[in-house]
Image: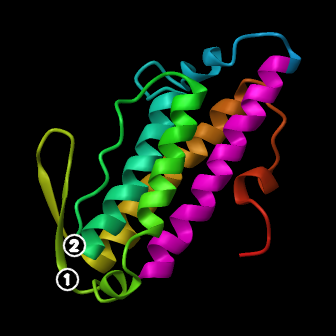
Amino acid sequence: MYEASVGLFVPYLRNLSALLDKGVACAEARKFNPTVLLGMRLAPNMYDLAQQVGEACRHAVVAPALLAECEPVALPPLEHDMAGLQARIATSIEFIESLPRAEIDAAAERNVFFKLKNGTELPFTGRTLLLTFSVPQFFFHVTTAYDLLRHAGVELVKRDFLGPRER
């Protein structure tokens, strides 16, 4: 359970951070403000890039916290600036790496409740939370962030999404 949560979220959050760095480098090379990237969206009713990053962090923080029976770290309000998003990613990584492995590993059959932003609580076991909700949600948002940056002309390849091989 630990490897399926912390062991998965941390490297991909690092990859997401590197994607944002490449977005900044592209903007600087093309002489435009990188903040423009953060407002991009694939469709009018979809989250923009900043919100995609925010949601990826939220799922990466909340699921392992629920598994560890800990309160998730309070992430600062979402800002539409690269430094703020990088800080959010770093805070998320630091928090989830601090969670106890034994508690998370023991959570497969434990009942947990994921609270949506509107207050609705969704019931899961620890295993179903990860496999049917949090991991798919996390990857949806990370993938969408990647796609938005690619669409903006940032030179990315699949290896940028997947990250270094040594895992």
Q: Which residue is mark 2?
A: 69
Q: Number of marks in the image?
A: 2
List x then y, in percent, for residue 115.
18, 52
Residue 111, by quadrant, is bottom left
Measuring 70% from the left and 41% from the top, which residue is drawn there? Answer: 19
For marks 1 and 2, give the one nearer the viewer.
2
Name the residue carrying label 1: 110
Left or right: 109, with 83 as reference point: left
Residue at 74% x, 59% y: name it: 163
Query: Are the residues flagged by discs 1 and 2 in contact, CB closer than 8 Å?
Result: yes
Residue at position x 64%, y 45% in the image: 17
At 55% from the left and 69% from the top, the residue drawn is 8
> From the viewer's perspective, is 120 left or right of 162?
left
Majority secondary structure of magenta residues: helix
What quarter of the picture does the C terminus occupy?
A: bottom right
Q: Which image quadrant is residue 37 in?
A: top right
Q: Is residue 59 magenta?
A: no
Q: In x, y percent, where is residue 84?
A: 51, 30
Q: Secondary structure at mark 1?
A: loop
Q: Which residues, given as a range, are shown in magenta?
A: 1-28
Residue 50 bears which disc, if any?
none
Q: Residue 7, percent across and down?
A: 54, 74
The amino acid at mark 1 is Arg
| Disc 1 from disc 2: Cα separation | 10 Å
What type is the residue that disc 2 sits on?
Glu
